[in-house]
Image (cartoon, helix red, strand yellow):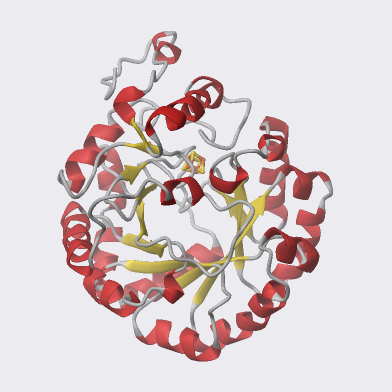
Amino acid sequence: MSYTQREEQVRESIEVRKPVAWAKIQQTDQRVKEGKSIALLQLQYRYVCNEVCKHCAIERFKVNLEGRKLTPADVKDIADQAHEYGLFSICISGGEPLIFHDLEQVIDAIGPERFILSMDTNGLALSQHEIKWLVTKGVDRIHLSIDGLQENHDEFRHEEGAWQHNIDMLPYCKQYGLGVVVNIVATKDLVRSREIEEQLEFIQKFGFHASLIYAKPVGNFEEAGDQVLNKKDFAYLETLTKKYNCSTHLTPAYGRDVGCLCFKRHFSILPNGKVLPCPWLPISMGNVLEEKLETIITGSLMNPWFSWKHKHTCHSGNQDSYFYKNVVSQLDELHDLFGYPVDWKLLNWHFEYFRKSSTKITEKGS
Ligand code: SF4
């Protein structure tokens, strides 16, 4: 297995600072052989936020969140289950985690010493003090949103000065040793205008890795179907990953090319405990407040759209894919009837796609 220079540095640092997490990372190859998940668990703990972004994926979830919400005690239970199952990476997400009143309790409940701990942030509430504090609490890296250059970012987020603020925070992250992955939403406009290349050149100066997030027609972006990429755009973005210090969800990581990450390398938990294959696929595969996390993961990995037996393109952001055309296309109507996220049992999963191949599959939801 070969690693990039950045991957080597991350591994060395975790080995020294977080031996419990490191021990689990060592099991990765064996887990993949056994068909188990090696996912990053994204915990969308609350939906409070201090920005109103054009592409916000959670906008429609907010209106459908009646009932019990996760507490720090639930977070501890979920993290305990994730640890016992062997997961080694948790990302605190929202909303905007930096304005959670109980962020410290959430971090402590996770137990930062046993996970690579990351946090999604729009950056607006970051300061030198916050950066220092996150490091002392055991947060390893932030996923910081910087969409395009100044004008594009501020307009996208309806916040003048937001871009400059995030740029100003980067040297502090370096100073205090907080890892940064710059998240860039790759819209059709950004790709077409080639502004994305200008931005990647600019970001390179700071020495941080960038992650190109495919634009998805969910949340606030639902009406912007024209911003969704196609396979030609996907191929173009992959050429950028070779030229710049950046990756997409489909770029091989840690020497492993798994295609779409759903459940293999990524899944999300909402504030009401529902589990999604990915933040941009509003499909509930179960609820951690009602079932064991392992039961949900194992069942979902039996679905051939998510299983290790198949490698797929992005299910939610490639308008040319079979899944996008046949499964994602059902979500809008089901949302109108039942709200988001849509229960997996309500979908026609179009498993005929796999029957055309000779692979024998055990499916969830057939
Ligand atoms: S559907 Fe796309 S964005 Fe979601 S996990 Fe798969 S590759 Fe990533």
Residue 72, percent across and down?
A: 22, 69
280 over 106 or under it: above or below: above
- Res 112 seen here: no
The one nearer the camera, 140 or 10, is 140
Residue 361, percent across and down?
A: 30, 18
Q: Is residue 272 toward the left or the right of residue 198 in the image?
A: left
- Res 300 seen here: yes
Residue 305, percent across and down?
A: 40, 28
The one nearer the camera, 74 or 302, is 74
The residue lying at 35 percent from left, 67 percent from top is 116
Q: Is residue 89 toward the left or the right of residue 99 in the image?
A: left
- The picture quadrant where one finds residue 167 is bottom right
Q: Is residue 319 toward the left or the right of residue 326 in the image?
A: right
The residue lying at 30 percent from left, 49 percent from top is 66
- The picture quadrant where one finds residue 334 is top left
Residue 291, percent across and down?
A: 15, 43
150 over 27 or under it: above or below: below
- The picture quadrant where one finds residue 4 is bottom right
